[in-house]
Amino acid sequence: MKKILILGFMVLAAMAGVNGASAAEKVTVFAAASMKEVVETAAAKFEAKTGTKVTSSFAASSVLAKQIEQGAPANIFISA
């Protein structure tokens, strides 16, 4: 699971590069509270490898989904 999350962060950074930036400056992850440990581990490894800052927000999946629907800026959403 950790490798998949790291890969997801890297794909996002690469996509930002396609749009003219050399890499994403910041990645915002909304994830289910049950995913906190694995997301934090993957985010730390991703930051160390790319220098891209990862900001994570953890809560119930339904709460995060509602926040995203209302315009919260999430690049990655990981539901339980």
Image (cartoon, rainbow, N blue to C red):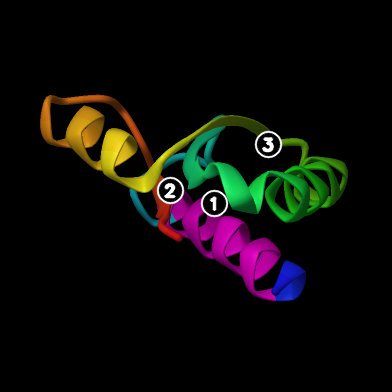
Which label is found at residue 16? 2
Please state the extent of the stretch shown in magenta in the rendering: 4-17
To which residue does mark 1 refer? 13
Structural distance between the alpha carbons of marks 3 and 1:
8 Å
* Disc with the residue nearer the chain's start (3 vs 1): 1
Q: Which residue is mark 3?
A: 52
Q: Are marks 1 and 2 in contact (CB under 8 Å)?
A: yes
- Left or right of 71, for residue 37: right
> Overall secondary structure of the magenta stretch?
helix
Residue 42 position in % (x across, y down): 76, 54
Three-letter code, disc 1: Ala
Cα distance, mark 2 to mark 3? Answer: 11 Å
| Between marks 2 and 3 in the image, the one whose residue lies nearer the viewer | 3
Spatial separation of the CA atoms under disc 1 and disc 2: 5 Å
Which is nearer the N-term, disc 2 or disc 3? 2
Q: Secondary structure at mark 3?
A: loop
Residue type at mark 2 is Ala
Label 3 sits on what residue type?
Thr
Question: Are dots 3 and 1 in contact, CB under 8 Å?
Answer: yes
